[in-house]
Image (spheres, rainbow, N blue to C red):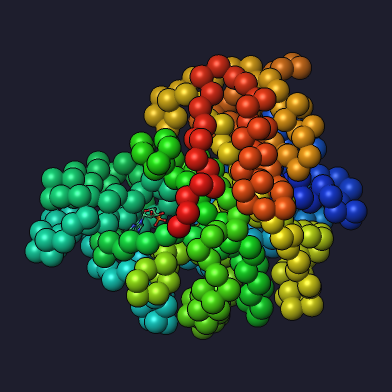
């Protein structure tokens, strides 16, 4: 089969890496891909948001399957576009991707179908939003832009001044464009956060193994929020009892709710969860594989990812027996110094082959490019140095031994990935 993967980060590298192991994938393409993906797939210089050009390419090259990994093309309707041209595509249609594309939609869905989440109100007027926050007088206040904002559209304001600045930034300065036309103001929850990705064809839902993300730039969760500085799987707090609770109260009700709304979700549904004193609640939904969660989840998947993708498209997921490896997997992100603020690119990267020579180690590229024979940094998050082992602790040790072999100027990584005990 000829397969095209859309996207160009660490998540897409992990998806390509897993698909490449399928005996049925004979030709693998990735748009736009990156320096690491280029070693296993043919990279095509089309942006993930250029959905017309992607559909033209898939049609011209007669792709047997296109896997749409990032949020924007899903929300923009790339899957619908491919289907309208008679092509097979993996990922939710736009009418289901809205579960991530609009926080107002997802909050209303949860309220209507009694899925546990933080209490909230929606505002389209900044003055009214501020009146509500003042009147409530409960801090921290959580302010969320309605639409996609690269994971940065959430402001946790510790006092009135910060809330005012946040509302202004989102709704008046339009820092995230039209994503900030409306805001969701919600109750602040506390507790450990767990990411659970699930395969679903709208009839069956199979949760993957759990993961946890480290979002802050520096050790002990200090510094700014980032796209994710590292992940580990499984979570230590996500017990089988908790999984059962989530299946009953969250996962299956969400699948049913989307069906009831005439928005059947087929693809990977990502549940961002928080284990609070009142039970597990949904913090957010994503309509896709998480990044960098995918980098620690897919190495634990036994068997053929292509087979699962095809079963979801054909709505026969119930026939597939999905198995996971025991033990643990850890991904340490090597970032450019200064990220998530200003950083430099174009630094030569060395040591990847030495790291990958270690048992159980794979280096997923997030922001790299090939320049002649040299591999250069080309983004804030550069690499995800990933190790799988018989236990989480062994995987942590292995990932850190591997990351020490990799070098580029001003490389920064957290030293405590996987260490959090909650
Ligand atoms: P989101 O994009 O909705 O996942 O939010 C980004 C991050 O903000 C989450 O991973 C949480 O750490 C935090 N967050 C979001 N909503 C809440 C909430 N209601 N209470 C506490 N923290 C939250
Ligand atoms: N790791 C969070 C996300 O993919 O949105």
- Snapshot quadrant of residue 366: top right
Count of number-bearing discs: 0
Q: x and y percent of residue 14 in the render?
A: 69, 46
Is residue 189 toward the left or the right of residue 133 in the image? Answer: right
Residue drawn at 51 percent across, 35 percent down: 415
- Quarter of the image with the C terminus is bottom left
Q: x and y percent of residue 87 in the render?
A: 75, 59
Is residue 274 toward the left or the right of residue 47 in the image? Answer: left
On screen, residue 324 above or below 391: below
User: Image quadrant of ligand 1?
Assistant: bottom left
Is residue 119 toward the left or the right of residue 29 in the image? Answer: left
Residue drawn at 60 percent across, 55 percent down: 233
Q: Nearer the viewer, residue 354 or 75?
A: 354
Residue drawn at 51 percent across, 47 percent down: 419
- Snapshot quadrant of residue 343: top left
- The answer to whether residue 180 shows anywhere in this view is no
Residue drawn at 13 percent across, 50 percent down: 160
């Amino acid at each position: 089969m000829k397969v095209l993967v859309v996207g160009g980060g660490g998540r897409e590298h992990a998806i390509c890496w897993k698909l490449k192991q399928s005996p049925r994938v004979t030709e693998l393409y990735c748009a736009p891909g990156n320096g690491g993906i280029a070693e296993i797939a043919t990279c095509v210089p089309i942006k993930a948001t250029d959905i017309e050009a992607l559909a033209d390419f898939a049609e011209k090259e007669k792709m047997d399957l296109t896997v749409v990994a990032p949020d924007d093309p899903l929300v923009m309707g790339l899957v619908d576009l491919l289907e309208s041209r008679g092509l097979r595509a993996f990922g939710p249609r736009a009418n289901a991707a809205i579960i991530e594309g609009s926080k107002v939609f997802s909050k209303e869905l949860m309220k209507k179908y009694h899925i546990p989440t933080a209490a909230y109100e929606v505002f389209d007027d900044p003055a009214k939003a501020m009146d509500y926050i003042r009147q409530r007088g409960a801090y921290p206040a959580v302010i969320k832009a309605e639409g996609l904002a690269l994971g940065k559209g959430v402001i946790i304001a510790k006092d009135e001044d910060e809330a005012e600045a946040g509302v202004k930034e989102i709704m008046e300065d339009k820092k995230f464009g039209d994503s900030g036309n409306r805001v969701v103001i919600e109750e602040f929850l506390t507790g450990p956060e767990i990411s659970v990705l699930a395969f679903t064809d709208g009839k069956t839902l199979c949760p993957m193994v759990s993961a946890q993300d480290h979002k802050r730039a520096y050790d002990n969760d200090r510094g700014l929020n980032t796209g994710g500085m590292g992940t580990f799987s499984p979570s230590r707090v996500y017990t089988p009892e908790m999984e059962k609770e989530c299946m009953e109260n969250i996962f299956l009700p969400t699948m049913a709710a989307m069906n009831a709304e005439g928005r059947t979700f087929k693809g990977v549904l990502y549940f961002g969860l928080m284990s609070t004193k009142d039970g597990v609640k949904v913090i957010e939904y994503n309509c896709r594989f998480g990044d960098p969660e995918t980098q620690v989840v897919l190495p634990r998947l036994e068997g053929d990812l292509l087979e699962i993708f095809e079963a979801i498209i054909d709505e026969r997921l119930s026939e597939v027996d999905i198995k996971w490896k025991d033990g643990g997997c850890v991904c340490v992100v090597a970032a450019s110094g200064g990220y998530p603020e200003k950083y430099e690119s174009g630094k030569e990267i060395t040591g990847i082959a030495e790291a990958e020579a270690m048992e159980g180690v794979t280096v997923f590229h997030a922001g790299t490019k090939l320049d002649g024979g040299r591999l250069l940094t080309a983004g804030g998050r550069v690499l995800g140095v990933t190790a799988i082992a018989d236990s989480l602790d062994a995987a942590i040790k292995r990932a850190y031994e591997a990351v020490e072999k990799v070098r580029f100027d001003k490389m920064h990584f957290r030293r405590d990935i996987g260490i959090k005990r909650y």
